[in-house]
Amino acid sequence: TVGKTITCKAAIAWAAGEPLSVEDVEVAPPKAHEVRIQIHHTGVCHTDAYTLSGKDPEGAFPIVLGHEGAGIVESVGEGVTSVKPGDYVIALYTPECRECKFCKSGKTNLCGKIRATQGRGVMPDGTSRFKARGKDILHFMGTSTFSQYTVVADISVVAVTPKIATDRACLLGCGITTGYGAAVETAKVEEGSNVAVFGVGCVGLSVVQGAVKNKAGMIIAVDVNDGKEAWARKFGATHFVNPTKLQGKTIQEHLIEMTDGGCDYTFDCTGNVGVMRAALEACHKGWGESIVIGVAAAGQEISTRPFQLVTGRVWKGCAFGGIKGRTQLPGLVDDYLNGKLKVDEFITHREPLSAINTAFEQMKAGDCVRCVVDM
Ligand code: NAD
Ligand code: AHE
Ligand code: ZN
């Protein structure tokens, strides 16, 4: 297959709000500094549903969605030295070129090298490698893992040991790394500090896991779904609050009471801008930091009284947890293999590619942490 177009199955999103269509797609061979990957497993993340809904200002159609995938390198284009055919890999929607201003800053994991073309749904040379029904199909987040074969830039992929199965490794491509990194890398939660996590889906449970790793004090899970309490406690949350059941006070007032003045760190893992405000206002005066992880729809804005910031609370956010994929993911895989990072526990549902729309329905159902799709 090296150097040739591969015809395989992919889930194509032809238009916003419509179910995905599993059909033949032609995947062109990788050009210079590109890698063609046979995807074995992919997770379905809330962000895929967000873009499919049409609310993502960067979402364009037709497109192959999916950004939480793992598999094997099938072939590489000219000049690729970081991975080789046969390598087990995780796709990276946050690439790492190690030479742009961002990568060299030491201050962020955001890489600038291919961000513009990635946002337009094309490869760095401005063209697509996917074709279906005679039409060019767009790439998504530089990864498009809802295809049995995909092409990514060589800076958008990391090789990992085959000791981790691809149905686990895929979850390190977004959900788990995002939450865990937000706690450990972005917030750098300190021993004994009080933490509140708003929304305990895959991302929020991973924040809980990171807070446990850093020996936080109180770890308060906040979710409107009571069914999430058992999950949160299983991952190490010390308290659970359902904000819809508080009588006569706001969730921020309740958390400030619980923690004698406010939390040291709070995390929004819902994408709801009202929740983001509550998370900021639940922070301790003088030093509390709130980390925005959730993705909000186009047109949504956050607000609070500036006095909240004047009095020392800090509002920030991160993508992919602040983790540099090529440098740090192999270490997270080691942590998993050494029993220091939970991954298996996140998989609640499984579907074959042919039933990927069922995976989307499950994700919205409330009893699903992650559905892994077998490609
Ligand atoms: P999820 O749907 O599995 O989890 C969201 C949780 O929030 C659910 O348990 C839900 O019951 C709860 N929730 C909803 N409304 C709430 C409210 N008002 N108060 C408290 N809890 C509430 O989603 P996920 O896959 O864990 O993703 C969470 C968010 O993070 C999404 O917005 C997703 O797009 C975003 N995300 C961001 C990044 C990043 O790099 N910044 C990466 C992955 C996901
Ligand atoms: N395109 C959206 C923004 C979506 C967004 O924020 N994506 C996160 C990853 S979510 C993964 O589940 C991200 O990586 N952001 C940084 C970046 O460079 O995109 C919009 O609203 O325009
Ligand atoms: Zn995601």
Image: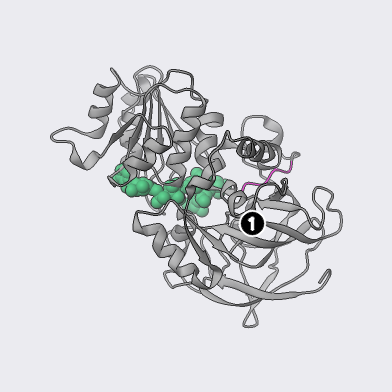
Toward the bottom, the furthest residue is 133
Q: Which residue does the numbered mark 1 point to in the structure image?
A: 142
Residue at figure coordinates x 49%, y 20% from the top left: 190
Q: Residue 296, can we see it?
A: no
Q: Which quadrant would the C terminus be assigned to in this image?
A: bottom right
Residue shown at 33%/25% (left/top)?
308
* Magenta part of the chain: 93-97
x then y, percent, for residue 336:
61, 39
Q: Is residue 96 magenta?
A: yes
Q: Residue 123, position in %: x, y?
A: 69, 61
Q: Main secondary structure of the magenta part?
A: loop
Q: Quadrant of the N terminus?
A: bottom right
* Residue visible at 35% across and 59% down in the picture: 365
Coloration of the structure image: one colour
Badge 1: how crowded within 10 Å, few (<14), some, or many (20+)? many
- Compared to 206, does 262 lie above or below? above
x%, y% of residue 155?
Answer: 73, 49
Magenta-colored stretch includes residue 197? no
